[in-house]
């Protein structure tokens, strides 16, 4: 069968005036319009195409690459708004439709939104929605603590940032653990910091573990000391905001790093800052 909204590996069956007709093993056919034909395509070749509905809701194939596929999430821009809903740029000739009922807040032209793409079973049309909660699944976790994961920043809350984890789960980055600017819709790498009750995922943008966080921070402090003639205007009494602004880390990590350097006899910690005691 043809998989609408997904990539399909189909066989070129015949050439016509309007394009190639492609078929699957079950005998279903779809048109690949002339504009997508290339000189190296031959009858009986198996080619990979994306199948979606054209402006008349007929299945059509394309060799173009969409910015989102069915059952996945992506950050897309609104191209137009009509009396029926909004239309998103997803990289294909026909824009992606978001009915008003699928908009958490009214969409505006030129703005970007994180959406989920699904196939409406009643109409067999591809529909995008900003109501993501019902498409995120945490009952059956496919990740464990410490795993590196792909993130899409979904929305800002009182606690921090909700994120889509590996195109499947819902996670949270706490605001007090964000040490660099991040934007809604941004794609990031992160790490599963903790799995809480009911499989709630705490996500960190920093890899956990002493050797992964503290040791690189300690080396950076030594490098900064060397660049600044053995002095750094931060100490264990510095405000978290100042530490974050200068080093982009939390005060907790900073204190662990300078504590280790102090024990090794490489620095002296004074009220006005840190002084190098190591060799150049």
Image (tube, rainbow, N blue to C red):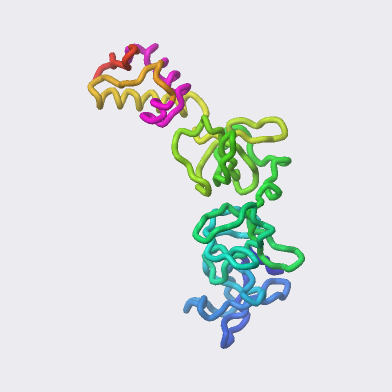
Who's the residue at 50% across and 47% down the image?
Answer: 186
* Residue 237 sits in quarter: top left
Image position, residue 275 (x, y; %): 29, 16
Tell whether 25 sits left or right of 64. Answer: right
Depth check, front residue: 53 or 108 = 108
Quick check: can you spot residue 48?
no
Q: Which residues are magenta?
A: 241-268
Depth check, front residue: 128 or 22 = 128
Quadrant containing the C terminus is top left
Quadrant containing the N terminus is bottom right
Tell whether 98 sits left or right of 229. Answer: right
Depth check, front residue: 217 or 136 = 136
Query: Where is 47 relative to 168, above or below?
Result: below
Image position, residue 138 (x, y; %): 69, 41
Magenta stretch: dominant SS? helix
How many labels, in total?
0
Depth check, front residue: 12 or 122 = 122
Tell whether 244 sits left or right of 122. Answer: left
Who's the residue at 43% across and 29% down the image?
Answer: 249
Query: Where is 176 relative to 80, above or below?
Result: above
Tell whether 29 sits left or right of 240. Answer: right
Q: Residue furthest right?
A: 122
Image position, residue 109 (x, y; %): 52, 61
Residue 108 lies in the magenta stretch: no
Query: Where is 225 relative to 21, above or below?
Result: above
Image position, residue 188 (x, y; %): 50, 44
Quick check: can you spot residue 155?
yes
Who's the residue at 71% across and 49% down the image?
Answer: 134
* Residue 10 sits in quarter: bottom right
* Residue 62 sits in quarter: bottom right
């Amino acid at each position: 069968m043809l998989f609408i909204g997904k990539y399909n590996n189909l066989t070129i069956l015949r050439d016509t005036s309007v394009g190639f007709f492609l078929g699957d093993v079950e005998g279903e056919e779809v048109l690949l319009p002339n504009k997508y034909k290339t000189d190296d395509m031959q009858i009986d070749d198996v080619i990979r195409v994306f199948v979606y509905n054209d402006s008349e809701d007929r299945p059509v194939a394309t060799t173009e690459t969409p910015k989102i596929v069915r059952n996945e999430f992506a950050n897309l821009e609104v191209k137009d708004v009509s009396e029926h809903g909004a239309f998103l740029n997803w990289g294909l000739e026909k824009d992606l439709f978001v009915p008003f009922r699928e908009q958490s807040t009214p969409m505006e032209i030129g703005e970007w939104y994180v959406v989920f793409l699904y196939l409406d079973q009643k109409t067999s049309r591809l529909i995008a929605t900003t109501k993501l909660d019902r498409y995120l699944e945490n009952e059956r976790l496919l990740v464990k603590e410490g795993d590196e994961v792909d993130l899409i920043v979904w929305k800002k809350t009182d606690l921090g940032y909700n994120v889509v984890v590996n195109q499947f789960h819902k996670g949270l980055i706490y605001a007090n653990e964000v040490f660099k600017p991040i934007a809604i819709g941004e794609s990031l790498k992160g790490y599963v910091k903790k799995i809480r009750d009911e499989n709630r995922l705490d996500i960190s943008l920093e890899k956990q573990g002493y050797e992964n966080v503290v040791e690189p921070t300690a080396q950076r402090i030594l490098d900064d000391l060397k660049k600044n003639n053995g002095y750094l205007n931060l100490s264990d009494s510095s405000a978290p905001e100042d530490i974050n602004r200068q080093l982009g880390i939390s005060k907790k990590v900073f204190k662990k790093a300078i504590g280790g350097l102090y024990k090794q006899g490489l620095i002296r910690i004074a009220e006005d800052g840190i002084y190098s005691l190591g060799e150049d």
